[in-house]
Image (cartoon, rainbow, N blue to C red):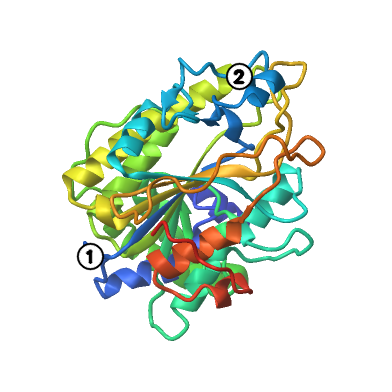
Amino acid sequence: MLIKRRSFIKGTGLATASLLMPRFLHAFDADEKVAPGNKVLVVLQLSGGNDGLNTVIPYGNDIYYKSRPGIAIAKEKAIRLTDDAGLHPSLNYLGKLFEDGALGILNNVGYPEPDRSHFRSMDIWQSASGAKEYWQTGWLGRFLDEQCRNCEHSTQAIEIDDMLSLALKGKTKNGFAFKDPRKLYQAGRSPLFQDFLNAHDQEHAEHTVSYLYKTLADTKKSTAYIYEHSQQLTTGLYPNHELGRNLKTIASLILSDINTQVYYVSIGSFDTHVGQDVQQSRLFKQINEALEAFVTDLKKNNRFEDVLIMSFSEFGRRVAQNASRGTDHGSANNMFFISGGLKQKGLLNELDDLTSLKLGDLQYKVDFRRVYATVLENWLNVKAEPILGNAFEPLRFV
């Protein structure tokens, strides 16, 4: 029986992961684990350009209210952080983390010559390139390249999604994308796998099919391992929406001590040109619920000190609201850091400067690659310059 490469990959539901699977799964043969005390990074991508001004609300600034007469959040509704700033009212659990010293907020993050295209700006953030550079690898993919240059097994990165983002694609190593360990396990047990393996031995098997033979043989052997690790420890109750389910999967893997240092997950869309208050509130409620369940799990299992949750969005929104009770594409934005192991907490720098705009947009003051350098060197314990291509001074929040 002849099985074409394209139809096989589509049939298994492993369209993005199958070619990446061997390197990921071979790491399990040595029973390598990320033990308590070793650091884990969870990247939370807010896709679509989240409005930072209605996330961290400068309720002490009159310009904010004059610029947004229809969508500004009143001081009495915001979750208080300081006398000058509060959080969106749907982020009350993050307010508790702020009080507990487990939340850091960095304002005015961006890059020179910002691009307001979703796709291009996301490529810049995921690759860590300059605005005029076009890179084919991501910063976390290059982390895998660098970390495992001389090691038998790569330190692994997992994205909870159907498609692998540029962020996790390296030159020689890649992360691994899947949504559900159970479905991955079931795909590995599919009769189609065995049909393919049998077909490989046939005299007229296509070369492209032979190319996949070893990949899928390893897959069949190892998918059960992933599933079993995800089931080792019972996690707590999570909200029944996509981010809740995805963070539950991440928690199950972290608590199993599987050999994974980086997890990547997304939520969106925050492209709030129209009716921003409803859309942003709905997504923030999901984030708030999911993070509460996730952090509760980590604390209960004594892993909160070892896990850093970092959020970002490809750009912020314009200061002034538009005519549709929304906001249009902007530039600089804020980033959140959640962990029991923060060295600096609370508001890590000054609030957005609303008196010095450029074409109606906030001007960045912190290059996002300084954040990446901080995470790479101070959390993941690897030199940042070879990964980022230039030297960026680390910050001190970890």
Left or right placement of residue 302 versus residue 349 in this view: left
Q: Name which quarter of the figure residue 324 lies in.
A: top right
Residue 274 image offset from top left, x and y in percent? 69, 19
Residue density around tag 2, few if under 14, some if 14–19, many if 20 or more, within 10 Å: many
Left or right placement of residue 103 versus residue 350 in this view: left
From mark 1 to mark 2, how far is it between C-alphas? 45 Å
Residue topped by disc 1: 35
Left or right placement of residue 175 versus residue 329 in this view: left
Residue placed most toward the observer, 353 or 87 = 353
Residue placed most toward the observer, 171 or 366 = 366
Which quadrant would the C terminus be assigned to in this image?
Answer: bottom left
Question: For numbered disc 1, what is the local secondary structure?
Answer: loop
Looking at the image, the residue that sits furthest to the right is 359
Q: Name which quarter of the figure residue 305 lies in.
A: bottom left
Give residue 72's mark. 2
Which residue is located at x 47 percent, y 63 percent?
374
Question: For numbered disc 2, what is the local secondary structure?
Answer: loop
Total labels drawn? 2
- Lower sequence index among marks 1 and 2: 1
In the image, what residue type sits under mark 1?
Answer: Ala
Residue placed most toward the observer, 96 or 236 = 96
Q: Is residue 269 visible?
A: no
Which residue is located at x 31 percent, y 36 percent?
99
Looking at the image, the residue that sits furthest to the bottom is 150
Residue 96 image offset from top left, x and y in percent? 31, 32
Residue placed most toward the observer, 208 or 171 = 171
